[in-house]
Image: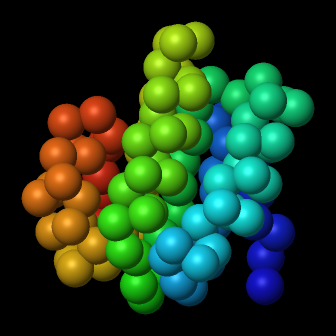
Amino acid sequence: MKEMYEQTKKGLLIRMPKEIDHHSVDEIKNKIDKKIEYDCVANIIFDFNNTEFMDSSGIGLLLGRYRMVQYIGGRISVVNVSDNIIKMMRMSGVDKFITISGN
């Protein structure tokens, strides 16, 4: 598997795992937060290409990272999102804060 993080011209690309649920979100969150703080990241692109399942804790993960970067003028976007996960994001209102791009 490719490295979870990749610095691009547009920002920090984070490849999300196959499953994002309440069992895994704390570990994912801690890794991302350390990377954001260590590298002083403003813009983050979450790549959901490999993600097959996400529960509401994934929404919390995205909103928490949004709050972290908004204070420094950063942005969050998500790419390669499946239709089911896009639907969940829109129902939760995440699309008002985060740019969403499907497959």
Q: Position of residue 29 (x, y in %)?
A: 66, 54
The image quadrant of residue 83 is bottom left
Residue 98 in percent (x, y) is at: 33, 40
Give above or below for 69 relative to 28.
above
Q: Is residue 92 above or below residue 52?
A: above
**Which residue is at the far left?**
91
The residue positioned 12% from the left and 58% from the top of the image is 91
Q: Residue at x 40, y 69 (%)?
A: 80
Residue 50 in view: no
| Residue drawn at x 63%, y 36% as measured from the top left | 11
Quadrant assignment for the N terminus: bottom right
Q: Is residue 59 above or below residue 21?
A: above
Q: Report the quarter where the C terminus lies.
A: bottom left
Q: How many marks?
A: 0
Horizontal side of 93 relative to 19 (left or right) equals left
The quarter of the displayed image where residue 28 is located: bottom right
Q: Residue at x 16, y 68 (%)?
A: 87
Where residue 78 sits: x, y (%)?
A: 42, 54
Q: Position of residue 64 (x, y in %)?
A: 50, 39
